[in-house]
Amino acid sequence: MVLGLGKTHIPYGMFDVERSADEARRFAKCERIYHRGQEIAWDGKEILPMLIEKHGGIDVEDDKKEALKRIFSIILWGELAAWRIAAQLADRLEPLEAKMAATSQAHDEARHFYVMYDYLCKLGYVPERLDRAPQAILDIVVGTDNLAYKLVGMQLLVEPMALTVFQTVREIAVEPVLTELMRYFERDEARHVGLGMQYLPVLMKDWNRRQISAMVTFQVRLMFWALWEQKILENDLVVLGIDPRKSLDRARKKQLAVLQTAFEAIGLPLDRERNYATMTMNAVIEFLFPADGVKAGLRGKLESVWNAFWRRPDRIDVTELDVHFSHAIKTARGEIARAERISA
Ligand SMILES: [Fe+2]
Ligand SMILES: [Fe+2]
């Protein structure tokens, strides 16, 4: 378009879309994600030095420091990928409110990236390449052009995994500055999950079964890489005093809670759906990360894997994300943002 006379890139039709009452409610929630993100935005250049001063520096034993560096280098590059993905969504999502929510997320992720980098530098971290598994997850989500896949991958699968890391690391209180910093990250990430939960059903409303099963295949690809990643990090988690199986179960619970909310909105009861992808995933988890109380020997192991395959899904708790909104944080306006509850 040398002369600027070709087809326009300005979406003049963006206000013409007909909306059902349910969609209007979802778009109002997306718009609120943007405004809330602006109201309670925090300043990383203020908060990190403030926390370091409060706790008199960063002090952590050497083996735990190395484990934290490995786990949080994945978070660091994950924040950069999330920033790119949010910017892609801000560009490509057309309805105004969804575009606003994604734009606000891009702003948050930029902050997460520089704050995590500043923190890791204090631990003596030197940036290096990721292992294959976490890199594959991020590449798949950055690389897909399907916006529904992008939302499922980032907002409903990767961000609940990050929230699990933040919550679990906060609970073990391994290093006081990081413990407090996690509250700030959790408040933001939980809002981002909200964008996925609100907007995915709008994108998927006219999908047929074939499209839905292709989406499930996409999720399974990501989940297998995620299990690989969990296996790579197993020793580091143990060094920090985290039970790898329990943290995996927690991440699955969060993912299933948000997926269920999004899928039920288009009439798919995810928790009652017995699909082979979920059943296989349960069996693989049991194989790689056996639960406590499994009988010794090959027979006991096979039995537990078999039982995991056929296990009825638990009733999923949709309040799983509320904990992340429960932290008071200091905003860039100098106010304290108190706990809030943003359920589906
Ligand atoms: Fe983030
Ligand atoms: Fe995020």
Image (spheres, helix red, strand yellow):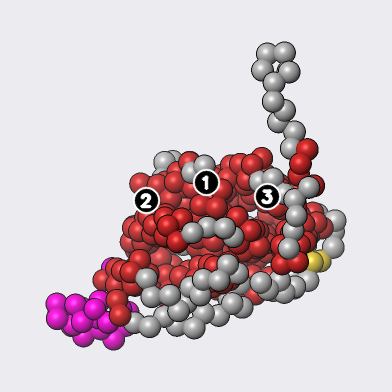
What is the C-alpha distance between the residues marked 2 and 1? 21 Å
* Dot 3 beta carbon under 8 Å from ligand 2: no
Query: For residue 133, which numbered disc appears in the image?
Result: 2
| Residue at x-position 85% and y-position 63% | 335
Asked if the residues shown at circle 2 and circle 1 are in contact, with their CB atoms under 8 angstroms apart, the answer is no
What is the C-alpha distance between the residues marked 3 and 2? 26 Å
| Residue at x-position 73% and y-position 18% | 5
The answer to whether residue 306 is magenta is: yes
Q: What stretch is highlighted in magenta?
A: 288-308
Residue 271 in the image: state x and y as whole percent.
Answer: 47, 77
**Element under label 3?**
helix
Q: Give the residue number, with chain letter if any, for mark 3.
A: 102
Q: Is residue 11 above or below residue 220?
A: above
Quarter of the N terminus within the rendering:
top right
Q: Nearer the viewer, mark 3 or mark 2?
A: 3
Query: For residue 146, which numbered disc appears in the image?
Result: 1
N-terminal-most mark, 3 or 2: 3
* Dot 1 beta carbon under 8 Å from ligand 2: no
In this rendering, position of residue 98 left or right of residue 259: right
For the residue marked with disc 2, what is the amino acid? Ala
N-terminal-most mark, 2 or 1: 2
Quick one: 296 or 48, which is closer to the camera? Answer: 296
Quick one: 311 or 64, which is closer to the camera? Answer: 311
| Residue at x-position 35% and y-position 46% | 132
